[in-house]
Image (cartoon, helix red, strand yellow):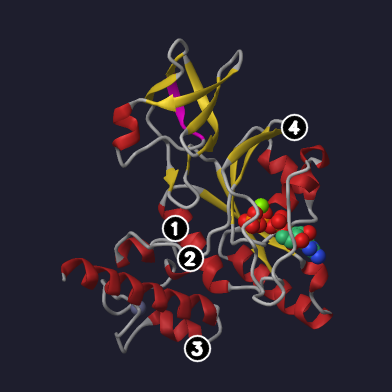
Amino acid sequence: MNGIIVKIISNQYTVKTAKESYVCTARGKLRLAKNSPVVGDKVVIDTQTKQITDILPRSNKLNRPPVANIDYALIVTSLKEPNLSLHLLDKNLTVVTYNKVTPIILLTKLDLCKETEQKRIAKIKKYYEQIGYQVFYNTELGSLKKILKNKVVTLIGQSGAGKSSFLNKLNPELNLKTSPISQALNRGVHTTRHVEIYDIEGILVMDTPGFSALNLNMSVEEMQETFPEFKKYVCKYQDCKHYLEKACMIKDKVKEGKILKSRYTNYVSFVEEIYANSRKLHK
Ligand SMILES: Nc1nc2c(ncn2[C@@H]2O[C@H](COP(=O)(O)OP(=O)(O)OP(=O)(O)O)[C@@H](O)[C@H]2O)c(=O)[nH]1
Ligand SMILES: [Mg+2]
Ligand SMILES: [Zn+2]
């Protein structure tokens, strides 16, 4: 019988079929493989032995959080507590885009920002919209529900960003556990511990644990492709990395204020991270 994995707790996989749900284990070969089952996987189960025997081909997959077959990744980005990190936002956008999932930026905790900060954030929001991303505040429930209707959606964001709180707003009956961040560390306390799918008025949405460390398992060329605003400019050198090159259109556009400075500095830090990773590999 075929079904979809809706929840994983250690090695217990909850698989939902057209009729009912089964709590299954995974067959040996699936447990050993690097490609072990993840939430969102479409699987074949043996209802007698309650085992997952096969995973059907995936349309896409993320490692952090471990989920598959996603239409949208909501990148939950807090503006305060924890403070806004454009570095983390850009990294999430790059990783999600590289893995063929469409990102939507979800900004939380605008209510904790002073008026001057709110103005700065509105400008940043506009920039990301201009380069092609959908950006919403977590208060815009109506618009979000329309876009997400009948889609498979995962939440991504660091601990304390407000992922579970957002789902509680979409459906107060869920009553998911949430906790205040640690004031001393200005960090979340890892309240959500497993990935689980909830059906909210036809939106299949996955609550996930928070992650802030993400790996860039890609080449510099592939990473470049995830910066849409760089694509409309042509540099002097065809294979320009926009890095050490002296003559570079991207650098010029940053100076002119056409490209957001943080986007470029984050891009450079990603280039350096990818080079550092490949040096580690070759040692
Ligand atoms: N003021 C304010 N607080 C919020 C908002 N969204 C979430 N919070 C608070 O932020 C804290 C953390 O929220 P959670 O929903 O637990 O965060 P999470 O992303 O699920 O965190 P993990 O499960 O640890 O990954 C809670 O105290 C929420 O009440 C918001 O828009 N405004
Ligand atoms: Mg949570
Ligand atoms: Zn360049």
Instruction: Kindly report the distance in space between the C-alpha atoms of the residues bearing marks 1 and 4.
Output: 28 Å
Residue drawn at x 52%, y 64% is 212
Cα separation between marks 3 and 4: 47 Å
Residue 201 circle label:
4
Q: Which residue is mark 1?
A: 95
Which residue is the site of mark 3?
Answer: 255
Disc nearer the start of the sequence (1/4): 1
In the figure, 204 relative to 24: above or below? below
Depth check: 192 or 132 in front? 192
Decide whether residue 43 is among the magenta residues: yes
At x 44% / y 70%, what residue is drawn?
230
Asked whether mark 3 lies closer than 8 Å to ligand 3, one says: no
Magenta region: which residues?
A: 40-44
Q: CA distance from mark 4 to mark 2?
A: 31 Å
* Quadrant position of the C terminus in the picture: bottom left
Residue type of the residue flagged with mark 2: Lys
Element marked by disc 4: loop
Alpha carbon separation for disc pair 3 and 2: 22 Å
- For ligand 1, the image quadrant comes to bottom right
Please identify, in this view, whether the residue under mark 1 or under mark 3 is nearer the observer: 1
Q: Position of residue 238 (x, y in %)?
A: 26, 72
Residue 94: in magenta span: no
